[in-house]
Amino acid sequence: IIHRIKNSNQDCLQITDAFSYACNLKCVYCMQQNIHNTCQKMDPSSRVEEWQKLMELHQAKFLNVCLFGGEPFFDSSYIEKILKIAQERIGEIGYTVVTNGTLINNEVIKLINTFSIDRIQITLDGPESIHNNRRVTSDFNCFKRIIKNIHTILENTKSTIFLNTVIDTANFSDIDDLTDILIKEFSKYIFNDHPRLIINY
């Protein structure tokens, strides 16, 4: 690996970092359930040091980080500490986040805007009944909350949202219904010269 790095030009390094395996949902297909019970969070300063070491190893001038989990916004204060340290030590960083979309609040919106998180991926497994059947929570209607939070993100940030749906035999026949719902809710963000809601099936 080091030999290949020395003989290549890697100006920009992309890191996908699982900040924590903790999550507020219990999705039926999650591969990381219960992992967080045996994992401890890395100290924010040490985490940024690892980013710096990877940049040095790859001779990278720029860094893009995908905030992953678990649910990255489950502990937004932890994310904020890391991004502040990274800003001080590394400078401008490009950020993407993969989130379940249920924990968007004023603190998260401020975080998105402060650190210019410009790409947000949220998964919708299908229309309300399909999605809620897979994303298990007893506290709220998961689908409705995500739709509301997508509006909040689009109205209060400059981020682009990528809605991701993995099609399988259980939800295939409902994809048209989901598409109709999304177009009704978000047409002005989908159909324009600079769309900010991208539907990915």
Image (tube, helix red, strand yellow):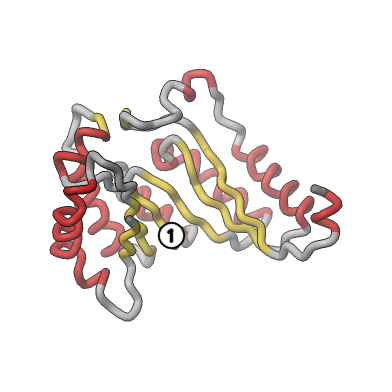
Give the percent coordinates (x, y) of residue 167.
30, 47
Give the percent coordinates (x, y) of residue 15.
60, 50
Give the percent coordinates (x, y) of residue 1.
79, 48
Name the image quarter holding residue 120.
bottom left
Name the image quarter holding residue 176.
bottom left
Along the viewing direction, whichever of 150 and 135 lies nearer the viewer? 135
Q: Amino acid at mark 1?
A: Arg
For label 1, the crowd category at 10 Å Cα-Cα, with few meaning under 14, some 14 to 19 and many 20 or more, is some
Count of marks overlaid on the render: 1
Query: Residue at coordinates 50% horizontally, 47% vertically from top-left?
Result: 67
Tag 1 residue: 119
In this rendering, position of residue 199 left or right of residue 56: left
Name the image quarter holding residue 5.
bottom right
**153 above or below 27?**
below
**30 above or below 180?**
above
Along the viewing direction, whichever of 155 and 161 lies nearer the viewer? 161
Q: Residue furthest bottom?
A: 193
Q: Secondary structure at mark 1?
A: strand
Q: The C terminus lies in which quarter of the figure?
A: bottom left
In this rendering, position of residue 5 left or right of residue 137: right
In this rendering, position of residue 121 left or right of residue 18: left
Give the percent coordinates (x, y) of residue 148.
20, 52
Query: Residue at coordinates 19% horizontally, 27% vertically from top-left?
Result: 138
Query: Residue at coordinates 34% horizontally, 52% vertically from top-left?
Result: 164
**13 above or below 38?**
below
Along the viewing direction, whichever of 51 and 191 lies nearer the viewer? 191
Q: Residue furthest top?
A: 38
